[in-house]
Amino acid sequence: MKLMFTTVPGIEDVVIRELDRMNINVRSWEKIGISELGGRIIVDLECKSLNFIRKMRSIEKAYIVINYGIFEGKNIEDLEKLIHSIDIEDVVKYLTHNTTFAVRSVRAGNHNFTSMDIMKIFGEYVRQYVKRTRGYIPIVDLENPDVVIEFDIIGNRYILSIEIVRRSLRHRPYRVYHHEATINPPLAYAMNVLLDYDPDGRYLLLDPLCGSGTIIIEGLNYYRNSTYIGTDIDYRNCLGSIMNIREADIYDRCCIICSDSTRLSKFIKSCDGIVTNPPYGVRMEPIDKLDRFYSKILNEFYNIIDVGSRVVFITSRRGIVDKILRRLKFRIIGRRFVEQGGMISTIYILEKEI
C-alpha cells in the first residue's frame, strides 16, 4: 500500500522513525516538496489496517495514493491531456449514488494554470467518467464532501490520492489553552525525537520557555518514562500549560514553574536535556536586545545540563545564535531547516562538552 503524509517541511525522516517505532514495515519512501524542504512524503508500506494513522504525532494529513508520476507540462492543455490519460477506476469505487465528493489540489512550481484550474478540470473528468461507466452523475459538495479526491502537482510530479484523515492531526484535543505563538505539535514532537535519546529511558527534561506546554506534552508522549519541567515568565502561560497538561492526562509527570528563563540556574540545578522554542524576537528592537537575551538563555542552558546531554531548540535567528555558540562549549550535533508559518527556521541540536 502507498500512502502520502503531509507534515512540517523538513521533518520527513521523523515520520519514518515514528512508523518504525510503531513496527510498520516501510519498503521505501520518497520526499516531495512544496518547497525545497519537502512537506509531502510518499511511503510504500506493509500494513493490514490504517488504524495506526490516528496515533501518529509527526503528521498532519494522510492519503491513499492512487497514482503518481512525472508531469513535464506547463500549460493548461498539458494538464487536460494528463488528467484524461489517468485511469480513475480506483478513485470512483469510493463513490456511490448517495455520496458526495470534492476535488482538492495543491500546485507548486512554474505552471501556466492554477490549483483552481486543476480542481475544475479533474472534477468534471470524474463526473463524466462516472456518468459514462456507472450511469449517474455524482454530487459535488465543496463544503462538506463524503469523499475528498486530492490531485496535486508539485514541480514536475503529480499525485492522485484519496484523503483518509479529514481533520488535520495537528489539532490536538488537549489544547484547551492557546498561546499566541504556539508551536505546531508535529514539530514539537519532532524536536523531542531529535534529542535522540532512548525513548524508553528515564530522563529529567526541561522546556524553559514552555508557553502552552506543547513541547512538554509531545515529549512525554515519546519519552513515556520521563519527567518534564516547564518554566515561563508569564503566569498566564503557566496556568494555561497546566490546563493543557491536565487535559493530556500527564500531570503526574510534569512540574510547571513561573520563572525567568535568563535566570534558570537559580531555580534548576541540573537536567538531562532541554527542548524549547525561544521567542524569535520579532518585536525585540533594537537587535542587540535580542542578542543579549539569546546569550543569557544559552549560557543558562550550558550551566544546568549535564556533560554529554543535549539541547534542541528552534529559531529564525541563525546569525545571532551561531555567533553566541562560538563562545560556548557546545558541540553542534546538527542543524536542520524547517518551514513553519511560511518562515524558514533552524533547529539546533547541541551537546555539552567538558
Image: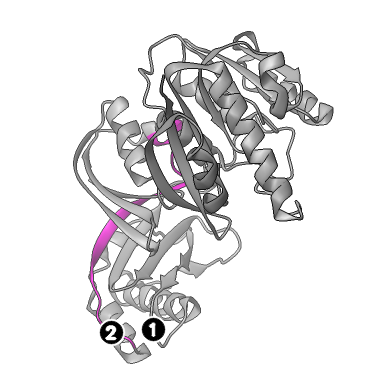
Could one spot residue 90 in this view of the protein?
yes
**Is 67 inside the magenta-drawn segment?**
yes
Which residue is drawn at the image coordinates 46% and 46% (left, top)? 165
Furthest toward the right, the residue is: 235
The residue range painted magenta reads: 53-74
* Residue at the far left in the pictured view: 27
Q: Position of residue 260 (x, y in %)?
A: 75, 26
- Where residue 193 sits in the image (x, y, percent)? 41, 30
Q: Looking at the picture, how far across and down is residue 157, in whole percent?
A: 28, 69
Secondary element type, mark 1 = loop
Whether residue 57 can be seen here: no
Q: How many marks?
A: 2
Q: Name the residue under label 1.
A: 111
The numbered mark at residue 57 is none
Taking the image as shown, residue 21 lies to the left or right of residue 10, namely left
The answer to whether the residues at label 1 and label 2 have Cβ atoms under 8 Å apart is yes
**Residue type, mark 2 in image:** Gly
- For residue 127, what is the image quadrant? bottom left
